[in-house]
C-alpha cells in the first residue's frame, strides 16, 4: 500500500518525525491520534485521547488542517464539527468493524419499528447513522447521558450491544439494542483472563465496556480508554490485565514505568487484538497526507447538518 502511494520517495524512517513536524507547522495543522494508534503516531500527535477527548479537541481547534490518526468515523466527526476546515485521514480505508455492523438502510428499517424511541448512538458510527440519531454518546459519557434522559422516554441504543447492555445495567434503563459489535473486543478469551489472574494474583483486571458480559464480570474496573488509563494511575495495584486494544498500553507503560500491564490473548491464543483498521495508519502515510493534503474527508452539507445536531447535544450534556 505504501509503495502504491509512492511513499518510498519520502523521508527515511529516521527523518519522518522531523519532516512531519515541519509540515505540521507549515500547514497550520493539528494532529489528533486515538489511543489505539501505533506508538510513534501517538508520540508525535498534538493530542492523544479517546473519542470524547478528540471530539472536544476537534470542536475547539483553530487549526487550518485537522489530521485525524484514527478510523473513518472519527475523521468524519471532525469534519461534521469543522465544515470549513480541511480534514485528512492518513489512510482512507481505515474503517471500523463496529460502524460497518450498522448499515444505514437496515438501521432505518429497524428504527422505524420503534417510532416513539429516542435514538442514542455510539460515536463509533458513520455520519449516515449519526444523522438518524437523536443523541450521540461515547463510552466515557454514555451512562451519564442516558441517566439524564426522562425516565418515561423509551430508548433505542446502537450499534454496540455489549456497550448497550453495560449502559442498561449501570443506568437501570431498559433499551432496545442494535446487535452490533467490535471485532477486537469480541476476540478476548475468558480462559486467558483467568489464567493471567492465576499467574498474577496481584493484578487488577480493567476492561472496556465493548467487551462481552462474561469478561466484564471478571473486571475490577470498566471504562473508556481514558478512564482505564486514569484508573491505572490512581489504583494501588502494581499490575493490570488490560481488556482493550493494546495501543493504550503505550500510554500506560510510558506514564507508569513501575507498573506492569498485561495484554490478553485472543480466543485462539494468538496476540491478535490489535485493530487492523486503526493500524492501517503509519508515520509514512501521516507525512504523505500532510505533504499532499490528501486523502480528504468530504460530506454532503445536508448530511453533515443532520449528523451535527446529536453531536452538539452530546457536547452540551456532557458534564
Image (cartoon, helix red, strand yellow):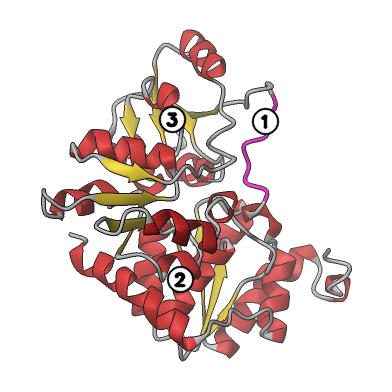
Residue located 35% across and 54% down the image? 138
Residue 275 sits inside the magenta stretch: yes
x, y percent for residue 109:
46, 58
Up-down relation of residue 175 to residue 71 (above or below):
above
Q: Earlier in the sequence, mark 2 or mark 1?
A: 2
Q: Which mark is residue 77?
A: 2
Up-down relation of residue 191 to residue 80 (above or below):
above
174 vs 75, nearest the viewer: 174
Tally the numbered discs.
3
Q: Which quarter of the rendering shows the C terminus?
A: bottom left
Residue 123 sits inside the magenta stretch: no
Q: Find the residue positioned furthest to the left.
A: 151
Q: Quadrant of residue 108?
A: bottom left
Residue located 44% across and 50% down the image? 159
Residue located 47% across and 87% down the image? 301
Residue, disc 3: 259
Q: Find the residue positioned furthest to the front.
A: 113
Region of the chain picked out in magenta, as a range: 270-276
- Is residue 45 among what the camera can see? no
x, y percent for residue 190:
52, 18
Q: Which quarter of the rendering shows the N terminus?
A: bottom right
Residue located 55% across and 58% down the image? 103
- Is residue 146 among what the camera can see? yes
Measure the C-alpha gap from mark 2 to mark 3: 35 Å
x, y percent for residue 296:
63, 81
Q: Main secondary structure of the magenta part?
A: loop
Report the side of 121 relative to 63 (left or right).
left
Q: Which mark is residue 261?
A: none
35 vs 174, nearest the viewer: 174
Can you tell which of label 2 and label 3 is closer to the viewer?
2
Measure the C-alpha gap from mark 1 to mark 3: 21 Å
Q: Which mark is residue 271?
A: 1
Amino acid at each position: 500500500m505504501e509503495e502504491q502511494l509512492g511513499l518510498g520517495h519520502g523521508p527515511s524512517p529516521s527523518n519522518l518525525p522531523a519532516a512531519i513536524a515541519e509540515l505540521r507547522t507549515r500547514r497550520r495543522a493539528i494532529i489528533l491520534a486515538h489511543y489505539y494508534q501505533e506508538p510513534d503516531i501517538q508520540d508525535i500527535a498534538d493530542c492523544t485521547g479517546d473519542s470524547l477527548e478528540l471530539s472536544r479537541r476537534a470542536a475547539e481547534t483553530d487549526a487550518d488542517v485537522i489530521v485525524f490518526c484514527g478510523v473513518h468515523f472519527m475523521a468524519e466527526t471532525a469534519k461534521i464539527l469543522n465544515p470549513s476546515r480541511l480534514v485528512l485521514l492518513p489512510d482512507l480505508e481505515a474503517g471500523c468493524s463496529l460502524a460497518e455492523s450498522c448499515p444505514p438502510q437496515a438501521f432505518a428499517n429497524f428504527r422505524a419499528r420503534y417510532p416513539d424511541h429516542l435514538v442514542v448512538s455510539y460515536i463509533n458510527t458513520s455520519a449516515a447513522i449519526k444523522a438518524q440519531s437523536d443523541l450521540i454518546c461515547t463510552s466515557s459519557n454514555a451512562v451519564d447521558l442516558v441517566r439524564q434522559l426522562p425516565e418515561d422516554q423509551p430508548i433505542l441504543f446502537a450499534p454496540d450491544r455489549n456497550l448497550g447492555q453495560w449502559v442498561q445495567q449501570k443506568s437501570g434503563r431498559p433499551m432496545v439494542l442494535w446487535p452490533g459489535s467490535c471485532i477486537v473486543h469480541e476476540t478476548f478469551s475468558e480462559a486467558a483472563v483467568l489464567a493471567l489472574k492465576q499467574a498474577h494474583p496481584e493484578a487488577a483486571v480493567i476492561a472496556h465496556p465493548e467487551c462481552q458480559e462474561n469478561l466484564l464480570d471478571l473486571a475490577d474496573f470498566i471504562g473508556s480508554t481514558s478512564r482505564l488509563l486514569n484508573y491505572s494511575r490512581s489504583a494501588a495495584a502494581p499490575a493490570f490485565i488490560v481488556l482493550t486494544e493494546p495501543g493504550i498500553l503505550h500510554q500506560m507503560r510510558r506514564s507508569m514505568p513501575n507498573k506492569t500491564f498485561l495484554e490478553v490473548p485472543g480466543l485462539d491464543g494468538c496476540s491478535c487484538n490489535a485493530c487492523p483498521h486503526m493500524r492501517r495508519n503509519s508515520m509514512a502515510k501521516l507525512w504523505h497526507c500532510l505533504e499532499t493534503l490528501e486523502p480528504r474527508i468530504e460530506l454532503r452539507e445536508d448530511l453533515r447538518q443532520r449528523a451535527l445536531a446529536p453531536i452538539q447535544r452530546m457536547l452540551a450534556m456532557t458534564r
